[in-house]
Image (cartoon, rainbow, N blue to C red):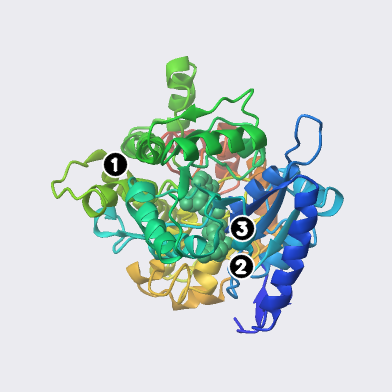
Amino acid sequence: MSDQYSINPAGEQFPMPQPEDYKAEFVRLKRRVEKERKLGREIVVVMGIGFVGVVMAAIVADAVDKKGKSSKFVIGMQRPSTRSYWKIPMLNSGVSPVKAEDPEVEQIIQRCVIDKKTLIATFTYDVLDLADIVVVDVQCDYHKESLGNVRTGRAEMEVFEKSIAIIAEHIPPKALVLIETTVAPGTTEQVAYPLMKKIFKKRGIKSEPLLAHSYERVMPGRNYVASIRDFWRVCSGINKQAKTRVVKFLNEVLNTKKYPLTVMDRPIESETAKIVENSYRATILAFLDEWSLFSERNGVDLIKVIDAIKVRPTHSNMIFPGPGVGGYCLPKDGGLGVWAYKHILGFDDDIFRITPMAIDINDTRGLHAAQLTRDALRNMGKPIAAANIVVLGASYREDVGDTRYSGSEVLIRKLTEMGAEIHIHDPYVEHWWEFELQDSFPTPGQSKARFFRNQEKLKAVRIIHDLKKVLSDADAVVLAVRHEAYLNLNPDDLIKKIGHPAAIIDCFGILNDADIRRYYELGCEVKGLGRGHIHLIKQSVRKSHK
Ligand SMILES: NC(=O)c1ccc[n+]([C@@H]2O[C@H](COP(=O)([O-])OP(=O)(O)OC[C@H]3O[C@@H](n4cnc5c(N)ncnc54)[C@H](O)[C@@H]3O)[C@@H](O)[C@H]2O)c1
């Protein structure tokens, strides 16, 4: 990437701001804010316009008072790195920088930027000088040092701590700082508060920083916007005033009439709620891994087993884990909790067994999907080395363009290590930076490439959007994500596009029994995670063809 341009996923170039641009930008913002204040609007700065911040910013900008008038003016603030700067001009033109299946994302952004004129974006930290409320949506990563051992990792606090320090250096003393970032429990009171207090002291400010915490439960996908606006929230404040302010703010911008707030006594409770909530989810996914193997080895279709159990209302949240559990949250949040127990809260005994184990199981499930692919090819008499393998789905979940910690990445890395040639299709993803920029993405030294050999060629991998083109002459096709486009692929059409029988690997319970049967009739081999009944279908097809 050039230092002068920031390039968006569609390949458009945006010139980076130059030192002389900062002053002019602040003058522009100051004038605009004065105008907005005259209209009686509160000034909200959302720091970090990533997957969460951009939609949260739009929701706040869309809020109206009892008379139906816009009550907030929102400025999304993004640090101008070459990787992220493009989000600012894109948002300022009324176009969402995040891609999702939910049509409301584009609509709400366009409405607020173009029609209501209540949302803009900027690159200068000076905008914090003008804030009544700051919403913190920057990342707090968890760096893992080995594959399948979360305990050896650590919370990457630098970005978050730096963001809090910048806020404290700029904000008016009475501004409310709402931390939405998922943080290690204890962070608001034991990391952010002392940091802000120290900087306030240096600035000669005697009042207490008004810090609050309320975590996001956003689910990028079909209900992206509603999952923030029309959903229950947990919140808390560092003192009475902060608590009152955060409750007031959230009541003004979210649909709390229908989805009431839960107010906790202290930020550590709300921080812990987030970590336990996601560790619970990671655990119920991980425990199905052993039953998935059990099913594969004993002629059982785990998909049907889960459907049978889910009829019982007490068990209705059972979910099949697919080729691993990705997304930004579930692979890391439990790690933040385990790390905080030692490194923020000061204990040195080891009380955690289930939470790290669940993450480790989920992180390595993609390896098994790769083994199934190897075995399916072997059954067709093709060695995996140099086989053409098409992976359908790069995202971590259906109908979103987010590849963070996706199960497909581990699967592809393992297949590549075994020598396969990889071709990828995903309707929502333009570039898979985890491969293309693996020397520096997500940060230098953190790529999962370091856990495998033979990874260099993955830098050249590009996402292909034409299904027919990508499938042509494939030896194996891996159905890796439940994207809408893959749910009803017709076996005859698929094999026609490939041009000959192939190995079909179903990682997500996508194929029904009739499809599986048809693939065998067409001369293919089929395998699936948790789908042990496949070989019974195979036998029955073979018998009827004798
Ligand atoms: N993505 C989800 O589905 C989801 C769901 C629930 C909670 N969360 C939590 O929300 C938080 C944000 O997640 P995300 O998915 O939006 O991450 P993201 O990486 O997409 O966005 C973070 C943004 O903050 C920016 N940033 C970092 N430091 C900054 C600074 N000093 N000033 C301005 N901008 C800065 C980054 O450049 C980036 O654009 C995380 O803690 C995450 O765990 C995410």
Is residue 167 visible from the viewing direction of this image? yes
- Label 3 and label 1: CA atoms lie apart by 30 Å
Q: Name the secondary structure under disc 1.
A: helix
In three-dimensional space, the C-alpha distance between marks 1 and 2, rounded to whole angstroms, equals 41 Å
- Residue 49 circle label: 3
Task: Check whether the beta carbons of the residues at disc 3 and disc 2 lie within 8 A of each other.
Answer: no
* Callout 3 amino acid: Ile
Which residue of the protein is positioned furthest toward the left in this rendering? 349
In the rendered image, residue 440, in percent from the top left (x then y), is placed at: 47, 75
Label 3: how many Cα within 10 Å (few below 14, some 14–19, many 20+) = many
**Residue sitting at x 57%, y 52%:** 134
Of the residues under marks 3 and 2, which one precedes in the sequence?
3
Rendered residue at 21%/51% (across/down): 342
Residue 518: image location, x then y, percent: 60, 40
Residue 499 can be seen, yes or no = no
User: Going 46% across and 58% down the picture, which residue do you hit?
Assistant: 205
- Residue 283, x across and y down, in percent: 35, 37
> Dots 3 and 1: beta carbons under 8 Å?
no
Position of 467 with respect to 213 (left or right) is: right
The verdict on label 1 being within 8 Å of ligand 1 is no
Q: Is the residue indicated by label 3 positioned so its CB lies within 8 Å of ligand 1? A: yes
Tell me the residue that label 2 is attached to. Answer: 126
Identify the mark nearer the N-term, 3 or 1. 3
In this figure, which residue is indicated by the disc labeled 1?
A: 355
Residue placed farthest to the right in the image? Answer: 115
